[in-house]
Amino acid sequence: MRDVIVQWLTELTQPFWNSSLSIDQFVTALQETFHMVCFSLLFGGIWGFIQGIVLLVTRPNGILPNRFIYHLLNPIVNALRSLPFIILLIAVIPLTKFLVGSSIGTWAAIVPLTIYIGPYMGRLIETSLLEVNEGIIESAQAMGASPFQIIFKFILPEARSSLILNLTTATISLIGATAMAGAVGAGGIGDLAISYGYQRFDTSVVILTVIILLLLVQFIQMLGDWLSKLR
């Protein structure tokens, strides 16, 4: 399938493509970008979901208030969110080497990307859940629902549309971070833009990279908007 796509794109772009970059390299970079986004979104989403739920239920007026846990987790989330990704990328190199055995490559980039997107998603998830009307929670408590039931049968279904839109925003931010990860040899579209577009002064590669990222972001935003309206 991949060879067919490469051949089709090569024939399509042959009349006007004069870059030193081959279509095969470009398709490989796209695969690396999707790889980084999907796995980082999966791991970061699990982490962020747990953070968002814990922050919601342990806050002072939450379902299970716990000042110690809330005041411990809240500043950690804020601290990780405040770090620029490029600094975080460098700061966690020892951890990345420990986990994957290298600080260069697609898998190596997934570690800082997960650490970057997890707290960001956690805060967005918390915000979405806080938008749920308190009357719904009070009604659930009056019916004798357990904290687990209140979260998963009342709060999450009510916050569904907001959650999807916020997760869409997080995904788009993650795509931007994967492009930035190319600065340290993570691979993907960002690496092509830097290695071929910037360092070799190949304007066509930069333009193509920008167009692809714009189309990808537009598609994800449209998909998120559509899913948020489904009932």
Image (tube, rainbow, N blue to C red):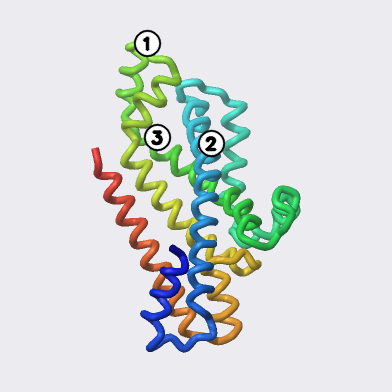
Residue type marked 2: Gln
The answer to which of marks 3 and 2 sits earlier in the sequence is 2
| Real-space CA distance between mark 1 and mark 3, rounded to the nearest whole angstrom | 20 Å
Residue that numbered label 2 is attached to? 51
Up/down of 55 relative to 78, above or below: above
155 sits to left or right of 119: left
Q: Label 1's element?
A: loop
Residue that numbered label 1 is attached to? 144
Residue at 60% across / 53% down in the picture?
110
Nearest the eye: 72 or 224 = 224
Q: In the rendering, at what x and y percent does residue 41 appear?
A: 50, 48
**In which quadrant is the C terminus drawn?**
top left
Residue at 46% across / 84% down in the picture?
204
The answer to which of marks 1 and 3 sits earlier in the sequence is 3
Residue at 52% across / 22% down in the picture?
65
| Real-space CA distance between mark 3 and mark 2, rounded to the nearest whole angstrom | 12 Å
Residue type marked 1: Gly
| Real-space CA distance between mark 2 and mark 1, rounded to the nearest whole angstrom | 25 Å
Up/down of 112 relative to 104, above or below: above
Nearest the eye: 220 or 134 = 220
In the image, which disc is placed on residue 129? 3
Residue type marked 3: Leu
